[in-house]
Amino acid sequence: MELHQLRYFVAVVEEGSFSRAAARLHVAQPSLSQQIQKLEVELGQPLLDRLPRAVVPTEAGRRFFEHARRILAQVNDAARCVRDGRDAPSGRVVLGAIPTIAPALLPRLIRRFATQHPQVTVEVVEEVTDRLLVRLEEGSVDLALISDAHPHTAIHVEALADEPLRLAVPATHPLARRPRARWADLHEQTALVLDELHCLAGQVAEFCRAADLRWNVRFRGAHLGTILEMVAGGLGVSLVPEMFRELAEARGCRLVRLSEPQPRRRLCLAQHNLRYRTRAALALAAMIRELCAAFAHERKARTPAAR
């Protein structure tokens, strides 16, 4: 059993196709197919069902896939450890971020990091929490910016800051002129919320249940940008993170503080406990902590004016 056979097998399972896997790995399809057949002969059973329109793993293939993926991640870590010298951080870091953090935080983070560490390439993956945790587990993501999560014990989740949620209303809405809104003001309001795949959707739903809030959900979307555009157009109101204030106001919305208990979410940094952390990844993690602390400080500085 050889490493390139594991890479070929994992690529075929992930792509669901011999041709796409071969193109992804830049190898000839006949060679790839031959190597996987040799692997199946060595293991004594088929790993893939070759269907007319797709290639899917057998039961044995599914079990083998998880082991193969972990082995490849460990080999990759070992190589990175050897390459990671004592010089300035360099190389590549893959940063994951959930969609309710990425638009507000990443432009500022990536610009600053690129200025201080020009030898490091940061690749960004925007996904919902569950998918980012899977990618951390398999080794295709180095760091992930998420909100509250309870992952597998191999993933370490570090709390960075608490962030309040604000009521987003059109600039012409009566509540836009108030220093703060009461929960009672939201009863029977038309609500625009995120799809349930997003952790923020669950957090907002929990806050509403705790406040015995009854509002009419008219729209579920995949992006906060869409929701903010609809709020600005007078189609409803929403609860959005404070870090989206600048983006919200640029679209014609106002973010209003809510009375106690104020809804909050936690900003977290997730990493794999067992994976080697390069100097580049450590530097990026340090800057993420600094930026989250700066956001918290800026928010506190704005609070007196909002009262």
Image: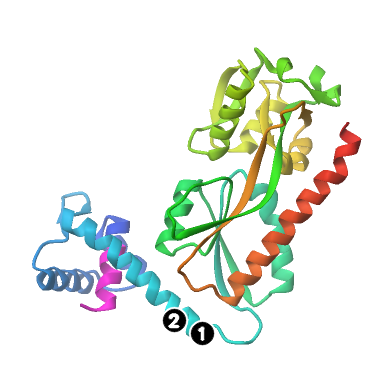
How far from the left and from the top, in percent, is residue 181? 78, 22
Q: Classify 10 Å Cα crowding around label 2: few (below 14), some (14-19), many (20 and above).
A: few
Residue 304 shown in magenta: no
| Residue 184, placed above or below residue 244 | above
Quadrant of the rendered structure where residue 256 is? top right
Quarter of the picture containing the C terminus is top right
User: Which residue is rendered at x = 65% and y = 71% of the image?
Assistant: 283
Residue 58 seen anywhere in this rendered image of the structure: no
Say left or right for 57 vs 89.
left
Q: Amino acid at mark 1?
A: Arg
Q: Amino acid at mark 2?
A: Ala
- Range shown magenta: 1-12
Are dots 2 and 1 in contact, CB under 8 Å?
yes
User: Which residue is rendered at x = 45% and y = 49% of the image?
Assistant: 131
User: Which residue is rendered at x = 65% and y = 48% of the image?
Assistant: 103
How far from the left and from the top, in percent, is residue 117? 69, 74
Please, which residue is most extreme toward the top here?
188
**Which residue is nearer to you in this view: 229 or 191?**
191
**Which residue is nearer to you in this view: 117 or 60?**
60
Quarter of the picture containing the N terminus is bottom left
The numbered disc on residue 83 is: 1
Label 2, secondary structure: give it: helix
**Which residue is nearer to you in this view: 154 or 60?**
154
Please, which residue is most extreme toward the right here?
305
Magenta span: predominant SS is helix
Separation of residues labelled 2 and 1 (CA atoms) = 6 Å
Q: Classify 10 Å Cα crowding around label 1: few (below 14), some (14-19), many (20 and above).
A: few
| Residue 281, placed above or below residue 164 | below
Residue 8 shown in magenta: yes
Quadrant of the rendered structure where residue 110 is? bottom right
Residue wearing tag 2: 79
How far from the left and from the top, in percent, is residue 234? 71, 21
